[in-house]
Amino acid sequence: MTVSNVVNGRPGVSEAVRRRVLEHVGATGYRMNVAARNLRSGRSGVIGLAVPELDRSYFAQLGAYITAEAKSRGYRVAVEETGAAAAGESAAIELSQALQYDGLILSSVEMDLTSISAAGTFPLVVLGEREGPEGLDHIRLPNREGARAVVTHLVAQGARRIVYVGGPDSSEVNIRSLRLAGYRDAIEQLGPAQGIEAPSELHVRIDEMTMAAGRAAGHQVASMPQLPSAIFAITDTIAIGVVRGLRDCGIRVPQDILVAGFDDIPESQFMTPSLTTITPDHQWTARRAVELLLERVAGTAGEARGETAPFVLTPRESTDKAQRQPGRQ
């Protein structure tokens, strides 16, 4: 029993005894039989994480935080790529159940979560904006609030013609529709008093969430008859591409035009110029996702919770009005 307590990190063993046990464990090459322990406990010690893409900085960063948080609680994480497709998301749930993971954190983009009842009592936490049924723990990003904050910041920096680079109008609830709504909220709220223009041509629509799409959008903005004073890109990935596209056309950021993004991926603070962005608390998101899931695993969770990650605006060089050209609005 003493050896078991030491190996499993339980209290109630003196430091001297703990050292002696660990010395013998090292000398004999003992390894815990995890499979046997899990069989006895009825748990695998593994949780799943399903994300749309593994080669995007945002999801790589999120995965690292979730893995670290789970590890601190004695769990390992198996990562699955869904391809941002409903079929991939559904398959991730089915695979997690088939492999007897203890639960799954799902970053959902396309799946109709009202059909999630097929998962039964399987512990599941959803990240993202998809509407889900009652009884499903859900963590959202501050999409609309963050978009309002970044547009308000651009106005405070003197911008009056602000382009939004993002997806097309949509009746679905997702980051495209919510961040566009936040942009429009700020324009409508500040426009009458500040003289802000928001004609339809100031919405540059993109079909893909890639740097290449952002670069093409930068070319499109550069070709406008009147160069806008600022750009709000739906994500940092798009914003980085936009800056490159503007540069291709001889337009400087922030001297000729301000640019801001959303997500605060690691590259944003190291690019030239560094990118102003909305910084959701990714570590909070990871911690709460793991907490909610493990409460479901342990059977201690009550009613399902829907929570929104906190955020801050992080101003950087790309919206530094001190570098603006005189007279440009």
Image: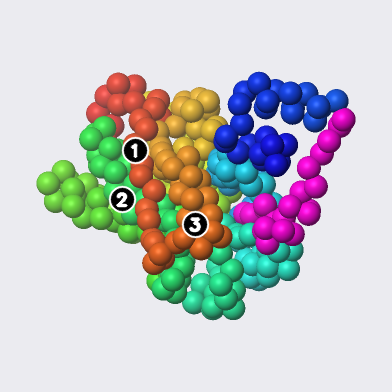
160 relative position to 210: left or right: left
Q: Work out whether 123 lies above or below 272.
A: below
Q: Position of residue 72 (x, y in %)?
A: 58, 39
19 relative position to 257: left or right: right
* Mark in the foreground, 3 or 2: 3
Comparing 10 with 161, the one in front is 10
Q: Position of residue 287 (x, y in %)?
A: 48, 45
Residue that numbered label 1 is attached to: 312
Q: Distance from label 1 to label 2 (Cα)?
A: 10 Å
Q: Secondary structure at mark 3?
A: helix
Q: Position of residue 226 (x, y in %)?
A: 35, 43
**Residue farthest left in this picture:** 193
Please tell me how crowded label 1 is: few (under 14), some (14-19), or many (20+) other residues with Cα within 10 Å.
some
Residue that numbered label 2 is attached to: 145
* Mark in the foreground, 1 or 3: 3
Instruction: Confirm whether residue 67 shows in the render.
Output: no
Magenta region = 28-49
Residue that numbered label 3 is attached to: 295
Number of numbered tags placed on the structure image: 3
Q: Which numbered disc flags the more N-terminal residue, 3 or 2?
A: 2
